[in-house]
Image (tube, helix red, strand yellow):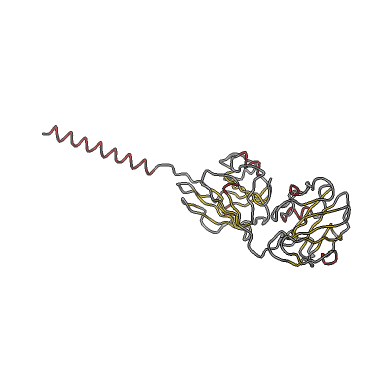
Amino acid sequence: MKRTILILLLSALVASCSSDDDAITEETGNTNGVIRITEVNTDIDEITIANFGDGAQDIGAYWLCLGPGTYVQVSNATSGSTNLNPNQSITLSYDVNPTSGGLSLFSVNTFGSTDPDVLIDYVQWGSANQARVNQAVTAGRWNNAEEFVTMVSPYTFSGSATEFGATFWQGTEAPAGNAVIRISTVNTATDTITLTNLGNATLDIANYWLCLGPGTYVQVTNAANGSTNLEANQSVTLSYDVNPSSGGLSVFTTNTFGATDPDVLIDYVQWGSANQARVNQAVTAGRWDNAANIASGASPFNFNGAANNFGSSFWN
């Protein structure tokens, strides 16, 4: 009888230990945070970051970066807690270009890194070949330097924790009643400029300005060869004396010619040679890709992009 009781006690002890081991395994499973950018809202300069993992992660020491010299630590971009539980998100304030940009998320401030544990996420919108996109491609955080999120802000991520690239991002359809005025042709042989409304609403651009540089500008109403009240997909040709060999042409909504606000400096193109007047303003405003880039070929120079495409790759 004693032998039977002892065997039963030992059996109960083994069962109890097995149950405890199972409980520890469940509690100590994979508890990693997986941090991803989930939304970029350029209209209100806000970035949303979420934890797709199954463990909490404090991202206060992480960094957002738009390119060399343009970055902010996460803890300095929010007044809320940066300790994200699984499926929790946080919204950060960060000044982003409304027309185009490339946003990286780094776990430390080693901004030249291609280590996927350091450069942990990336998204570019508006146009290709944004800052740090090649790093992101090497790190496996973006699919291709030429791919970007189209349409307009907000840009939202629809993928899972392990999916990266433009395929998993969507822009928003432009709202009804939105006029978008773009330079569509520069003909240096005839000294004419064509402006086109690529939006979906009518707009009178009589008070807009063409500018070739400091002291060289004309108001649209004084240069137009036709109506300046442009309906969707309608154009107007302007007479403006442009240099046939090289130049940089801006379109401003007001005569604030020093502006870098993309609602004021609304379009730009340069041809013939790099570093033309106001190109740095245009790059800052997101209206040109790089001060060293020019429209290819010879006059007439024609724009072949969409309403939200800016830069030399959309000119020929």
Residue 111 or residue 250, whichever sits in front: 250
- Residue at 87 percent across and 59 percent down: it is 240
- Residue at 80 percent across and 58 percent down: it is 194
- Quarter holding the N terminus is top left
Location of residue 24 with respect to 220 vertically, above or below: above
For residue 299, side relative to residue 34 (left or right)? right
- Residue at 73 percent across and 54 percent down: it is 287
Query: Percent from the top left, x then y, of residue 54?
Result: 45, 46
Residue 311 or residue 77, whichever sits in front: 311
Query: Percent from the top left, x then y, of residue 248?
Result: 82, 53
Query: Percent from the top left, x then y, of residue 4?
Result: 14, 33
Query: Can you name the residue that lies furthest to the top here?
Result: 3
For residue 303, side relative to residue 38 (left or right)? right
Query: Percent from the top left, x then y, of residue 274?
Result: 81, 47
Give the number of callouts: 0
Location of residue 264 with respect to 22 vertically, above or below: below
Residue 238 or residue 84, whichever sits in front: 238
- Residue at 80 percent across and 61 percent down: it is 236
Q: Quadrant of residue 263?
A: bottom right
